[in-house]
Image (cartoon, rainbow, N blue to C red):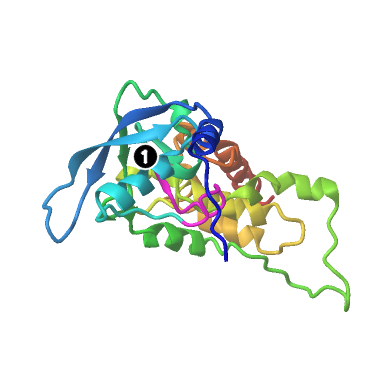
Amino acid sequence: MSTALVDPDAVSEVEEHDDTGVQSFLVTFIIRRFDPEVDAEPRWVDYDVELFSTDRVLDALHKIKWEVDGSLTFRRSCAHGICGSDAMRINGRNRLACKTLIKDLDISQPIYVEAIKGLPLEKDLVVDMEPFFASYREVQPFLISGSAPEPGKERVQTIKDRAVFDDTTKCILCAACTSSCPVFWTDGQYFGPAAIVNAHRFIFDSRDDAGDMRLDILNDKEGVWRCRTTFNCTEACPRGIEVTKAIAEVKQAVLRGGA
């Protein structure tokens, strides 16, 4: 069995060819840390991370966790803006870490990262999502029909009928909209934008027969009327849903007595 000899000059040429010339930057992250077993209050900790402009905030968090401080705690799953797991406040705005590119931030200044607001803080960037999902479940976000489809047939719906609620089918339950709402921060009973959006999706679905029931639920004092139309939720939504518009449409449906 022969051993191939490698020309050192050839190696250097390959390395030079592989070098894309993409510049890296030293970026400072200031992360709000909290360990319930150690800390009485959250504290800010800074990290310097070498990144490329095409990296995302999630890449930076991975680098910190894997190479600097393994105790850093945050949620993530798909890393492609679909699961909604990594919603957090980045420079004071609710965003998905996996969709926030370093090049879109001002790296001449530190990048501040903290957990979303309005939900109980568990550790570092992780919050207790149960109150959020409790509101979501309360609006019964599933199809309720009083009749069965014909045997072997699907429930037919026109393109026009589908378009009425198409926007609100895009919700990924990341809680970015709900936790950006000032009313939700101060009133733990408010359903919040995400629950109303998911109620909207079925209230206006022509195949559903429980719209009036959901409208009654949202006509509660902690329902749609708590919305102050600040548009924070619309701005925060990573899926581009017109959340405030959906809430306004639910309010109108309540006043009309039906969708």
Q: Which residue is mark 1?
A: 89
**Main secondary structure along the magenta-highlighted residues:** loop
Q: Residue 146: percent from the left, percent from the top? A: 74, 72
Where 40 falls versus 140 (above or below)? above
Of residue 17 and residue 45, the one placed in the foreground of this image is 17
Where 228 falls versus 145 (above or below)? above
Q: Residue 121: percent from the left, percent from the top? A: 27, 53
Q: Residue 2: percent from the left, percent from the top? A: 57, 61
Magenta segment includes 239: no
Q: Residue 136: percent from the left, percent from the top? A: 49, 59
- Residue 30 in view of the camera: yes
| Residue at (67, 52) in percent of width and height | 258
Kindly indicate the quadrant of the structure image that contains residue 24.
top left
| Residue at (14, 48) in percent of width and height | 41
Please tell me whether mark 1 sits on a helix, a strand or a loop: strand
Q: How many marks?
A: 1
Q: Amino acid at mark 1?
A: Arg
Of residue 116 and residue 112, the one placed in the foreground of this image is 112
Of residue 54 and residue 167, the one placed in the foreground of this image is 54
